[in-house]
Image (cartoon, grey):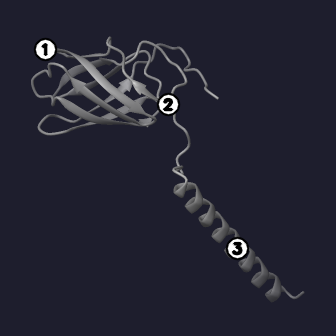
Amino acid sequence: MNSLSAVSSSRTLVRRLQRAAAGALLVLGACGGGTELLFVPFFSFGFTGTVNNQQLSMSLKPGDDCSTAGTLPATANLNLQGRGASAISGTYDQRNVTITLATPPAGLAAVYDGRFQDRDTLAFTPRGAGAAFTVTRIDVGVALPNCP
């Protein structure tokens, strides 16, 4: 086989592999799956950030488990320095989190859609008028568990 034939054969093989990979992704998507790997949302240790130069702290769930979807417990809460506190209710499904503030502090919306940017960072977008904010897990020097 000459070098031109070898290059042509290699290109054909690459194209076949690309088509097979694209087909596999289509099948996976059709089955309700996605290309994103399973994400376990760990809520422990609390989160902190700032909104309009005010310190914001959140406690969403008292501990870690390996559930990928569920409801936040009744103990979930938010505190905005100098503006008040609120109980939080909400749900989560992998990276997505929806929260409702029982008594939104001044400048915050009643309902937020959130998304884990990574294992330690949550970004929240208001539904309606209110400030968007991002919070980061408070580092207490303890490693997060690994789930299967």
Among the two numbered marks 3 and 1 on one chain, the one whose residue lies closer to the N terminus: 3
Tag 1 residue: 82
The image quarter in which residue 95 lies: top left
Query: Residue at the spot x=51%, y=14% of the render?
Result: 141
Contact flag, marks 1 and 2 (Cβ < 8 Å):
no
Residue type at the position of mark 1: Gly
Circle 3 residues within 10 Å: few <14, some 14–19, many ≥20? few
Give 44 or 72, whichever is nearer the viewer.
Answer: 72
Tag 3 residue: 16
Q: Is residue 90 left or right of residue 80?
A: right
Residue type at the position of mark 2: Thr
Query: Residue at the spot x=53%, y=19% of the render?
Result: 65
Q: Alpha-carbon distance for marks 1 and 2?
A: 34 Å
Query: Residue at the spot x=38%, y=17% of the render?
Result: 46
**Element assignment for label 2:** loop
**Element assignment for label 1:** loop
Residue type at the position of mark 3: Arg
Tag 2 residue: 68
- Name the image quarter holding the C terminus: top right
Q: Alpha-carbon distance for marks 2 and 3?
A: 35 Å
Among the two numbered marks 2 and 3 on one chain, the one whose residue lies closer to the N terminus: 3
* Circle nearer the viewer, 1 or 2: 2
Give 2 or 59, whichever is nearer the viewer.
Answer: 59
- Name the image quarter holding the N terminus: bottom right
Circle 1 residues within 10 Å: few <14, some 14–19, many ≥20? few
Q: In the image, residue 7 lies at what x, y percent?
A: 77, 82
* Circle nearer the viewer, 2 or 3: 2
**Element assignment for label 3:** helix
- The correct choice, above or below, for 138 with respect to 38 in the image is above
Circle 2 residues within 10 Å: few <14, some 14–19, many ≥20? some
